[in-house]
Amino acid sequence: MTEVSAPRSFQEIILRLQAYWAEKGCAVMQPYDMEVGAGTFHPATTLRSLGSKPWAAAYVQPSRRPTDGRYGENPNRLQHYYQYQVLIKPSPPNLQELYLGSLVAIGVDMALHDIRFVEDDWESPTLGAWGLGWEVWCDGMEVSQFTYFQQVGGHDCHPVSGELTYGLERLAMYILGVDHVMDMPFNNPDAPIALRYGDVFKQTEEEYARWNFDVANTEVLLRHFEEAEAECATILAQEHDDPKTGKRIIMAHPAYDQCIKASHIFNLLDARGVISVTERQAYIGRVRNLAKQCADAFVLTEAGGAGASVAS
Amino acid sequence: MPDLLIELFSEEIPARMQVQAADDLKKRMTDGLVDAGLTYAGAASFSTPRRLTLTIEGLLAHSPTVREERKGPKVGAPEKAVEGFLRGAGVTRDQLEERETPKGAIYFVAIEKPGRPAAEIIADVLDATIRNFPWPKSMRWGTGALRWVRPLQSILCILTDEEGAQVVPLDVDGVVTGNSTQGHRFMAPDRFAVSSFEDYAAQLKRAYVVLSPQERADAIWQDATNQAFASGLEVVDDKGLLREVSGLVEWPVVLMGSIDDAFLDLPPEVLQTSMKEHQKFFSVKNPKTGRIEKFVTVANRETADSGATILAGNQKVLSARLADAKFFWENDLRTAKSESGMAAWVDNLSNVTFHNKLGTQAARIDRVATLAREIALVVGAEADLAEQAARVAKADLSSEMVYEFPELQGLMGRYYAQAAGLPQDVANACEQHYSPLGPSDDVPSEPIAVAVALADKIDTLTGFWAIDEKPTGSKDPYALRRAALGVIRLVLENNVRGSLRESFAHGYKGADVEHLLGFFHDRLKVFLRDQGIRHDVIDACIAMDGNDDLTLLVKRARALQDFMSSEDGENLLQGFKRANNILSQAEENDGVEYSYGADEKFLEDQAEKDLFAALAAGGGAISSAIEAEDFAAAMGGMAALRAPVDAFFEAVQVNADNQIVRRNRLNLLSQIRKACVQVADLTHIEG
């Protein structure tokens, strides 16, 4: 094993992951430009895991979990954080080795650490998706989720995608030996203007925590939820043949945007504490219903493998 | 005779599935081989996180040749029938043999099925075993359709005899059998070839893999207890955790670490739960103080720094976890100690639905509180305290700690009620009111806890009965059978006296009380049967008045069971049945009820007079014993009737010619019946 130098900043870890997965042949994509709860929601994962077409993508995805806001005070919890996401379809036979290679690339010395694959079956009730896999432990800390997708949007995955999700802040804090996320070097600590994670995000954590928990207008949010739901249905109800261009254009992605929107609004409403336990299930069911309809639409498109012969 | 070695090598198998999977592999393979004629001398299976291994010793090299005779059509049967037979049996006409039978000449044929070589059979059986393996959950991967618990990477399958080892050829959807395997994922990842099970196990050990889960568990436990002992501490026993941890490592390395002083004030249960659930750590406690001071973690490898980096990492993760737990604990304590105390938590429960037809948790707490007051009177608790306990017993469901660790519900309630300055009995009731949870769980005995525990369960049962969500067959999603058994044990073990019907009436309105009581009687029968009480004895007691007072019911049943297993009891039962049969028949024929007592002046025989006297003396004694609930004395009174009853039937003809004498004797029989059924409805007793 070649000696890998230790990274010195949060961004260096991200850059190394980008370089590593680029070198392994993934399309390095950019974050999706909407608020999502996890990297899985990016259409590069959710939609692209459907259908028969091969796919390999890696990207950073800012993720928002309004209920996890702690005003920037908790050393490990944030309402806005980053996930690193890799999706390869079909899952290659050496995916575990590829994954372990990525840990080496970001400075984890396999000879000193204890890496374990511990059963963790993944399920997203809002996406109608599930898979089997593990949480990966490094010295007892969960550093990644590793999942073989079995079903997404109610569709069986065939071929199966392998999905890797790294919680970047937690992983980076461990590698950099930092105890409080806000103390973590964001850029090179020797740079003329050295920035810590707190310099970038402490204030926003406070602002969003206050808004998420106490200020967000729940009536407006409830209305937005209904509107997103209605818009999704409207989009999907359109004729597949576009009357203007005469082309067959199924608008799976615009419809899916509305699903993402509804899902995030639901998370905000949840953080505001206005959703009771019984209603919760109903809301999750409504978002899942949108996700399923989008998946149904996507598999009719070219990217969804329609018309292509099933990969063998 | 050759030996067979199979290893199914995959990505990490969930710890909880490994041992069962190893058993299933052994069973399915050996069953399949034996069915195909391959017997063997011995077999054993093993599992690690990455492999299932099966070794079979002394396997037949070939399945034996089987001769089978088949009977065909009659000689002279239509040509088509004969041809069909030849095709079906796979033989030619010259192999047919004509044989005379009582039904005429018939074609017979002897078919010889040659034995097959072991390798062929093994390949077939292994292929079927892999494809139909009973994993609790399985998956596909890549482009394939094969299912396994996680991607199956390689199959080792060799037959070894004096000549050496041979690979059994098989291709399962592209996974091809070979003679090699891999060692530890990090410490010895290279592939190596093996020639026998002994060679395999020895090479694996050199490649940092302990094949046997039991050996790994033993090593972990021994090392952990030794390390703890050296520090004057002891490891908290946890068999389930030991089993799980043994399934997470191929090369166990036990490391003991310290818990930061800042966390030692947390309740020990919180430390233990947090460490076990999140980190799979064993707790290490100081036997002198009972405090948990250290932890044991089990790593999967040796390192150049003797695990220092691994331990430091684990310690750091634990500190972050415990910082969370401490944060919850301190926030919760602040709430509990605040002016409004636990009331704020209870208020929160008005936003939590218990069941959409049964309202919120808060509404449920109101009902339980009212019911607890009523039950307090029966169990000897102070009504105000019982109500107070019922009102706070579920408050901890709103606490941050229980949100994080649901399994700590009740226990945290006790801590927080103490912090809130509530009486100790009330705090204890918070913890104990969920009990008993299972047949072996302890039953609370403090009156307040008993009152709340009963009220909680009776509210649940009457509620679900009222909305018609009763258990059916194997479906009991709300654990109502367990709740009913809980009530039964609470009542019996605390000698609670009182009417269940009345308690039900104070519970959720609209339940079919008689149906619910019947459900209780069914649960009671199951419960008592396990204690050796016959179901007919219970039925005889259930048929009596006061059958909703379970303590009384069981007291009666126990006395009756004792009596029925005595000689007097058995004989008296025969006498009773005889009396009852004669009487019922006569009553039916005559269209009257013989319920007056006998008249002394019409008594003729001595046996008749003796019985009359015995009934006069005994009947009253039995009644007063029953009145006093002294069932033993009542049974004694019954026993005293046995001899005169026997003598009566021996000497006296009931259906005398003289109608007055006959009627009088029938009236005497009705006195027997009356005396007996005060104790229990003996018509239910079998035999």
Image: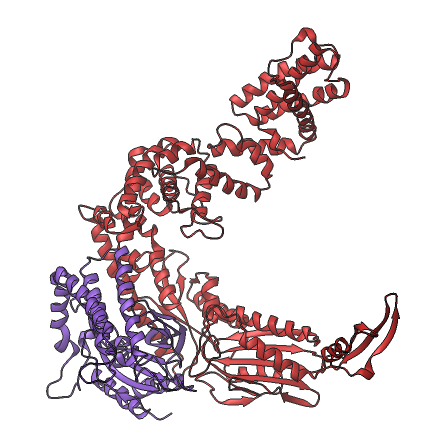
Q: Position of residue A187 (x, y in %)?
A: 17, 85
Taking depth in this image into account, of B138 and B195 the one nearest to the observer is: B138
Asked if residue A121 is positioned above or below residue B293 in the image, the reply reads below
Q: Quadrant of residue B640?
A: top right
Q: Position of residue B394 (x, y in %)?
A: 30, 47
Asked if residue A255 is positioned above or below residue A1 in the image, the reply reads above
**Considering the image in quadrants, where does the C terminus of chain B appear?**
top right
Q: Quadrant of residue B101?
A: bottom right
Q: Is residue B186 visible?
A: yes
Determine the residue located farthest toward the front in the rendered image.
B78
Residue B252 located left or right of residue A196? right
Which residue is drawn at the image coordinates 31% and 91% (left, top)?
A: A4
Taking depth in this image into account, of B672 and A76 the one nearest to the observer is: B672
Shade representing chain B: red
Which residue is drawn at the image coordinates 61% and 78% (left, top)?
A: B125
Q: Position of residue A51 (x, y in %)?
A: 35, 81
Asked if residue B477 is positioned above or below residue B158 in the image, the reply reads above
Chain coloured purple: A
Q: Position of residue B494 (x, y in %)?
A: 45, 37
Q: Is residue A177 visible?
A: no
Which residue is drawn at the image coordinates 39% and 59% (left, top)?
A: B286
Determine the residue located farthest toward the top in the rendered image.
B601
Q: Quadrant of residue B113?
A: bottom right
